[in-house]
């Protein structure tokens, strides 16, 4: 016999719990299903644990550089990796327990453990249980991509999930992938004390960014002792004694790097292959992402897809915004759209990169007349006081509307300062609102008006 609900949410990642609770508050009897970890990627092996590890790595880095600030630390700085992992686990457990209690104690919400599979457009099986509902919300997230490369199936390797179990210091961590995940782990483990080499197939790091951003990030990380090998076109994996060898080139020397451990950081794939989407008639694209419209509805009436599985964003904040869009449209009579949001994200190396809106390349491609201003972090008093003057600030403005088109803030607190520009962009206000604002001294944000006062035509 089937169990009848008004709504079913599949997955407890960032969008799922909030949506389930909101649906229940609106009077809908709701089931939320999780087959593995409550909280999804962000809570278990994404944002929360990685930023906790980054904090430990920064503590080690600051301790080693205490002498630069007149603070003498006697003896060697030692990193206890078992304690580092234990601290990370404690923080994760707090988050998981909080989400679990929230779902288990919310009236109208039933938390069901198990693997959900569609049996039809309005029914889902979980083990030997059959659940039916008029509304089904797919929030199954994604997982690390394991690309097809010679030897990969024969050699043990780490990804962003399995590396969360590491409680030791790798002697030489080789990372395949020079984008956000790979670079954060590269700096983290270098600061813990590992030798680190990053291998990237593209000619530069994080190729979606403008060239000067990629170059500056490479320079920052190289200064900490991280080695890079770009244009790696013939990647293959093999065992070398107790370690692993990564072939990088068919021509250039050296052709391979030998390390103690291998981390794959080459993108994500959606968890959609084993959902029975074909039984529900839900369409996916060539990469397995669920096809959705501007309001996150699939091609099947009564089924929505949120989070990483829909291919419309790959961040925790885009997943949560998916929830906000669906809830507002379904329950509040609003008309919110995915296309209304402004792309924004951060690279959480140290110093961080805060990004909002368009890159310079995108602005040039659009053909619009634009203004641009840049400022090195050496010109920011707060950065000099902190002894962290790496990076730069960059803002792009539409020459006709005077609205901010995009920003790249690579420097201390860049991930926070960019939020102020983002708010002005959402308000569709001209850049002069920020240019004329009075900011607190001494801060990084106080230099944004100065930066905007130096706008020049984009050549």
Image: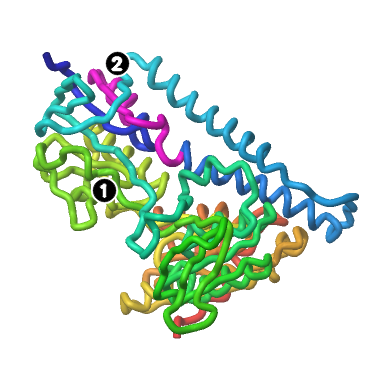
Look at the image and say whether residue 203 sits in the magenta stretch. no
Q: Position of residue 422 (x, y in %)?
A: 46, 55
Q: Tell me the residue that label 1 is attached to.
A: 310
| Direction from residue 354 to residue 115 in the image, left or right | left
The residue lying at 55 percent from left, 63 percent from top is: 409
Q: Tell me the residue that label 2 is attached to.
A: 108
Q: Is residue 31 above or below residue 37?
A: above
| Magenta stretch bounds | 18-42
Q: Where is residue 458 in the image (x, y as percent from the top left)?
A: 45, 81
Mark 2 lies on a secondary structure that is loop
Q: How would you rate the neighbour count of disc 2 (Cα within 10 Å): few for under 14, some for 14-19, many for 20 or more?
A: some
Look at the image and say whether residue 40 sits in the magenta stretch. yes
Classify residue 81 by image quadrant: top right
For the N terminus, the image quarter is top left
The residue lying at 11 percent from left, 42 percent from top is: 278
| Direction from residue 222 to residue 433 in the image, left or right | left
For residue 438, say whether it is visible: no
Mark 1 lies on a secondary structure that is helix
Q: How many labels does the image show?
A: 2
Towards the viewer: 264 or 249: 249
Label 1 – label 2 distance at C-alpha:
27 Å
Q: How would you rate the neighbour count of disc 1 (Cα within 10 Å): few for under 14, some for 14-19, many for 20 or more?
A: many
Q: Position of residue 180 (x, y in %)?
A: 48, 58
Identity of the residue furthest to the bottom in this view: 459
């Amino acid at each position: 016999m089937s169990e009848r609900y008004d709504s079913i949410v599949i997955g407890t990642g960032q969008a799922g719990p909030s949506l389930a609770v909101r649906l229940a508050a609106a009077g809908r009897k709701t089931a939320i299903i999780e087959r593995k970890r409550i909280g999804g990627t962000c809570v278990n092996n994404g944002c929360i644990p990685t930023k906790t590890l980054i904090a430990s790595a920064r503590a080690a880095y600051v301790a080693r550089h205490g002498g630069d600030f007149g603070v003498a630390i006697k003896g060697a700085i030692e990193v206890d990796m078992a304690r580092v992992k234990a601290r990370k686990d404690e923080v994760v457990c707090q988050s998981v327990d909080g989400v679990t209690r929230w779902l288990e104690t919310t009236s109208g919400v039933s938390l069901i453990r198990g693997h959900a599979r569609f049996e039809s457009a309005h029914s889902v099986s979980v083990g030997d249980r059959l659940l039916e509902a008029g509304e089904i919300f797919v929030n199954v997230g994604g997982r690390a991509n394991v690309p097809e490369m010679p030897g990969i199936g024969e050699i043990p390797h780490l990804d962003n999930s399995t590396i969360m179990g590491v409680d030791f210091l790798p002697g030489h961590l080789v990372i395949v992938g020079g984008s956000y995940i790979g670079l954060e782990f590269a700096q983290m483990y270098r600061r813990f004390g590992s030798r680190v080499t990053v291998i990237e197939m593209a000619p530069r790091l994080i190729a979606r960014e403008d060239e000067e951003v990629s170059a500056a990030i490479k320079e920052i990380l190289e200064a900490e002792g991280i080695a890079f090998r770009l244009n790696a076109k013939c990647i293959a994996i093999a065992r070398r004694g107790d370690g692993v060898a990564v072939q990088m080139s068919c021509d250039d020397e050296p052709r391979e790097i030998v390390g103690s451990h291998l981390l794959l950081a080459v993108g994500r794939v959606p968890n959609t292959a084993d959902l029975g989407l074909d039984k529900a008639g839900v369409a996916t694209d060539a990469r397995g992402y669920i096809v959705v419209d501007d309001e996150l509805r699939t091609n099947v009436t009564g089924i929505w897809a949120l989070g990483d599985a829909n291919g419309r964003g790959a961040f925790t904040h885009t997943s949560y915004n998916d929830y906000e869009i669906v809830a507002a449209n379904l329950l509040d009579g609003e008309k919110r759209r995915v296309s209304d949001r402004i792309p924004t994200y951060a690279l959480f190396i140290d110093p961080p990169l805060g990004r909002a809106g368009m890159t310079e390349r995108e602005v040039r491609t659009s053909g619009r007349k634009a203004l641009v201003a840049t400022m090195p972090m050496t010109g920011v008093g707060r950065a000099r006081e902190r002894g962290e003057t790496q990076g730069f600030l960059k803002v792009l403005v539409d020459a006709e509307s005077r609205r901010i088109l995009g920003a790249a803030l690579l420097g201390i607190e860049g991930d926070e300062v960019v939020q102020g520009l983002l708010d002005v962009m959402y308000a569709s206000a001209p850049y002069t609102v920020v240019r004329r604002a009075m900011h607190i001294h001494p801060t990084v944000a106080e230099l944004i008006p100065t930066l905007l006062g130096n706008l020049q035509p984009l050549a």
